[in-house]
Amino acid sequence: MLRNFRKGAVIVGAVSVMALSACSGGSSTEASDSPATSGGSETTAEAGGLIAVITPSHSNVFFKAEADGAVAAAEELGYTTQSDSHDDDPNKQSELIDAAISNGAVAIILDNAGADVTVGAVQKAVDAGIPVFLIDREINETGLATAQIVANNSQGAGLVGEAFVEAMEGSGQYIELLGRETDTNAAVRSDAYHAVIDQYEDMEMVAQETANWDQQEAFTKMQTLLEANPDVKGIIAGNDTMALGAVAAVDAAGLTGEVIVAGFDGSPDAAQAIKDGKMLATGLQPAVQIAQMAVQQADQYIRTGSTDLPEKQTVDCILIDASNVDRYTVFALEG
């Protein structure tokens, strides 16, 4: 049975938009009424102190890249750092926030463990006078975090959806693998995929399953789904980890070259799979750039009391496929 996971159309853009430089050739920031980000403060202070960096598991190359990027940027600016993983466990995340408060952190860089469950954790830090800079994932609250800096998931997933439809020649059966339901990005990407794919009447989704961002779970589910749906021409996944699980399942079924697989994130393993002809495309999220932006804004906030930027900020993604994969570096594209 198909799962109705989509949560309504995602509208990209805002009433007030300002340009930021980005490796993808441009990004935008969405205005927010957060008092933490408004300009006009005359406060000046010295840089330095502890910046706590908290992300999901470092066993995922994406999260390790953003954590390492944040740590490197902070240490280059003269801060000490503590880098930890909450493993997508809200309780562990809360404990790490408590530790950052106890350790006197001057800022927290956070890739959070859930859009709703993280609101309280951010509130704790803010109540303790510690600004929080969210990366990669937003929370369902504005006016708490000093910044929420994310990849433009809707724009990037739209690019992947277009490449997927083109490779499928606008028709045929396909399967969608969804990310963790508590993660806002999972719904955003799925909505953006379908905003493109659903325009084609001959594109038929025969299964939609959650694989929780996990490669092994995606592999296991895809083995069953491929057996049940022998006429499938394509698989589109909410992230590269699940896409790589699908690639392995397609390979095990002897269908490499016959079933198209597309993902999202821009991971090194996905880039290699594209080079090997086992994967069509991925949407590159500039993870390191976003982490560095958060640290730079934290530094400015610590020194001046303001970032001079809106709370909500997005950075455009880049489609990585056979045409440009040779210029790929870790979550970036050269030239």
Image (tube, helix red, strand yellow):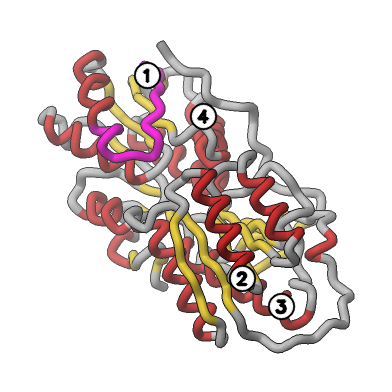
Q: The residue tagged with tag 3: helix, strand or loop?
A: helix
Foreground residue among 221 and 255: 221
Q: Is residue 170 left or right of residue 37?
A: left
Image quarter in which the C terminus is found: bottom left
Residue type pointed to by label 4: His
**Alpha-carbon distance for marks 2 and 3?**
22 Å
Q: Which residue has dot 1 on it?
A: 207
- The first of marks 4 and 2 along the sequence is 2
- The first of marks 3 and 4 along the sequence is 4
Q: Which residue has dot 2 on it?
A: 21
Q: Which residue has dot 3 on it?
A: 302
Q: The residue tagged with tag 1: helix, strand or loop?
A: strand
Q: Which residue has dot 4 on it?
A: 194
**Alpha-carbon distance for marks 4 and 2?**
29 Å
Which dot, 3 or 1, sits closer to the camera? 3
Residue 32 percent across, percent down from the top left: 80, 54
CB-based contact (under 8 Å), mark 4 and mark 2:
no
